[in-house]
Image (cartoon, grey):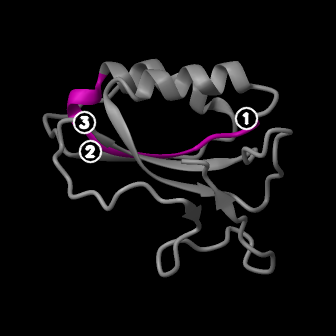
Amino acid sequence: MVIKTKSKNIFIKIDIEGSEYRIIDSIVKHANKISGIAIEFHETDPLRPVFISAIKKLQKKFKIVHFHANNFGGYAGDGLPETPEITFINNKINIKTFGKRKTLPLDNLDASNGPLRPDYKIKFNL
């Protein structure tokens, strides 16, 4: 991945069916040009070490500001959705936060990926 721009306000949407893990290092390398990212991660159960590594790398430069479960994927054995959609904002951006959420999805923000299926309910143990 090559980012050739003078802008430092790029927002990236990533949904590349399992190849997202391959570009994490490049995203972190170019973090100074990226204001935010929305990434759909795939196969979080069989690729758990890779998924955890990717999240840790991203969190060095970005903070997680939203989480949504794609309701076309299942759940891993520990309850983590197989296909989470995670939104990150650059750590250098000062945004108003609303605290940690205990449950998701959020009304008036999230929508089911499969509208004929109920959205996955997520409860965090905070």
64 on left or right of 83: left
- Res 44 label: 1
Eyeballing the image, is 27 above or below 73? above
Can residue 58 be seen here? The reply is yes
Eyeballing the image, is 16 above or below 22? below
Q: Which circle, 3 or 2, is nearer the viewer?
A: 3
Question: Tag 1's secondary structure?
Answer: loop
Q: Amino acid at mark 1?
A: Thr
Q: Earlier in the sequence, mark 3 or mark 2?
A: 2
- Residue under circle 2? 10
Quadrant of the image occupied by residue 64: top left
Question: In the image, what residue occupies the spot 16% across and 38% down?
Answer: 8
Question: In the image, what residue occupies the spot 73% across and 35% down?
Answer: 44
Looking at the rendering, the stretch of residues picked out in magenta corresponds to 30-43
- Rendering coords of residue 81 (x, y %): 73, 48
- Residue under circle 3? 91
Q: Which circle, 1 or 2, is nearer the viewer?
A: 1
- Rendering coords of residue 29 (x, y %): 32, 18
Eyeballing the image, is 60 above or below 76? above
Quadrant of the image occupied by residue 43: top right
Question: Tag 3's secondary structure?
Answer: loop
Question: In the image, what residue occupies the spot 75% across and 25% down?
Answer: 47
Marks 2 and 3: in contact by CB < 8 Å? no
Q: In whole angstroms, how far apart are the C-alphas of marks 1 and 2?
A: 26 Å
Q: Residues within 10 Å of mark 1 (few under 14, many from 20)?
A: some
Marks 1 and 3: in contact by CB < 8 Å? no
Q: In whole angstroms, how far apart are the C-alphas of marks 3 and 1?
A: 24 Å
Q: Amino acid at mark 3?
A: Asn
